[in-house]
Image (cartoon, grey):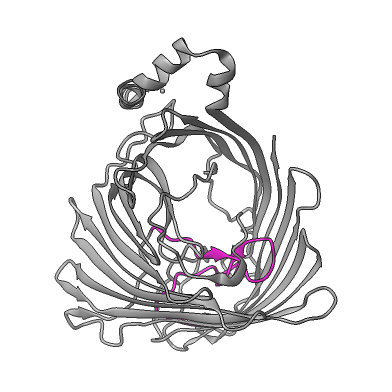
Amino acid sequence: MTHVQNLTVEASIASIPRRRPRRWCQDTAWLLSLTLIATPSGFLLAQTSDDEEFLDRLEYEVWVDASFERLGNMDLDSRRSDGLSAVVPELGLGIDFEVSDTIDAYLSLLAEGWWAVDRGRERGLEESESSLNVSELYFDFYDITDELSFRVGRQTFADPREWLYVEELDGIRAFYDYDDLSLELSASREREFTRDIFENDASEERVNNYIVSGSYQLTDDHQAGAYALVRDDQLGSVNPIFYGLRAGGAVTDSLDYWLELGHVRGRDGSDRLRGYGVDLGGTYQFSAPLEPSLTLAYAYGSGDSNPDSDVDRQFRQTGLHDNHGSFNGIQGFSYYGETLDPDLSNIEIVTAGIGVRPSELSSVDLIYHHYQQDVATDDFIEGSLLLVPTNGESRDVGQAVDLVLGYHAFEDLRLRSRLGYFMPGGAFGNSASDAYSLVVGFEYTF
């Protein structure tokens, strides 16, 4: 995971963002056709140039990623055996080809799996999965004008904190960059074409995404931005529109901050959507051995106190998000909690974290979270993997502690470990017992 130093907001960089190599069957034709149509110049170049010139235009990267993941007591009942352990391997190949001075092409293939290795007696049967995916396939067109460029194809949409989106979408983006102003405009759809080479897994959903965003570099240390995201469901009745303001930067050399203000409108069936959310915080790094740091953060997503009305005031995130980032360390994690890992919806989260950097390429973070519902409801926590709903009698969801370790000191090898422990509150009743999660893994790049 790329380290997001300073926790700045999404830049919406209008110059085309650098590719992120991470993340055929009956629909393979679209891939082959797109490649053959869009790269004739690359083909001719390969035929008419010597091998050295061709290789100068070609870059590739191979990586292996593997994790052991464990969930324990997600039904909050210690009398039942519902644990689940799985191995998650990944093998990826990224190929970057300079078609011409103004066109680049990128292809990312990803073989990945999810294999259950242990499950509790009460745990339902989750089938092991494996796939070979076309993760990304797109073309960059530069210098349309001095300020304008385009990206067309399957591509990763991501903001640094993954609060708005981190998803591979099929679509087109335009980037405009002029002095300190950056603008981005896009139209896309999730899995419009098949992703798995050996299985037709094209989505049956028809949700179009339209995004316009912009950012302005106020000073060298401060940036502000705004966005609008429309999710237009062609087959369903849920059509939210997300508006937001964001800011971030460095108050001093030691203090970084971020701010997200979000508002959702639109419709869910006959109900009008009118929710709002806030996420703000800062990290202070002390001038001392081990570079200790302190992070304080507050996040709030509104609930709906009157569910019988035709206005739904519960905030919801986009569905393209992941809420994954870092503070002052090198290892990313779920910053709303590793075990509960909720969406920012009908919830209030207070976070405090301390971290140290034993070396430039290693970090340790200890994070505390306190959760409370905005409106007490008898429903499942939005986005969480918990198997039980809240009782609607108490707003106290509980507390959590996470321990995050990252070690990147080996050449081309990254080690990671994330342990989360959730202690339920009154919203789950007096008999609820603690839950935990564990992720241990590595990434090696060739």
How many numbered markers are drawn?
0
What type of secondary structure mainly makes up the magenta span?
loop
Q: Nearer the viewer, residue 73 or 224?
A: 224
Decide if residue 192 is on the left or right side of residue 73.
Answer: left
Vertical relation: 19 (above or below) 131: below
Which image quadrant: the C terminus? top right
- The residue sitting at 29% across, 59% down in the picture is 211
- Residue 389 lies, in percent from the top left, at 46, 73
Q: Nearer the viewer, residue 43 or 131?
A: 43
Instruction: Residue at the far right: name it.
Output: 289
Q: Is residue 43 visible?
A: yes
Residue 439 falls in image quadrant: bottom right
- The residue sitting at 40% across, 44% down in the picture is 155
Residue 138 falls in image quadrant: top left
Query: Is 69 a magenta residue?
Result: no
Read off the magenta span: 320-349
Q: Is residue 398 visible?
A: no
Query: Is 332 a magenta residue?
Result: yes
Residue 345 falls in image quadrant: bottom left
Decide if residue 140 is on the left or right side of residue 121.
Answer: left
- The residue sitting at 49% across, 81% down in the picture is 280
Vertical relation: 168 (above or below) 4: above
- Residue 9 lies, in percent from the top left, at 47, 70
Which image quadrant: the N terminus? bottom right
- Residue 61 lies, in percent from the top left, at 61, 34
- Residue 249 lies, in percent from the top left, at 53, 76
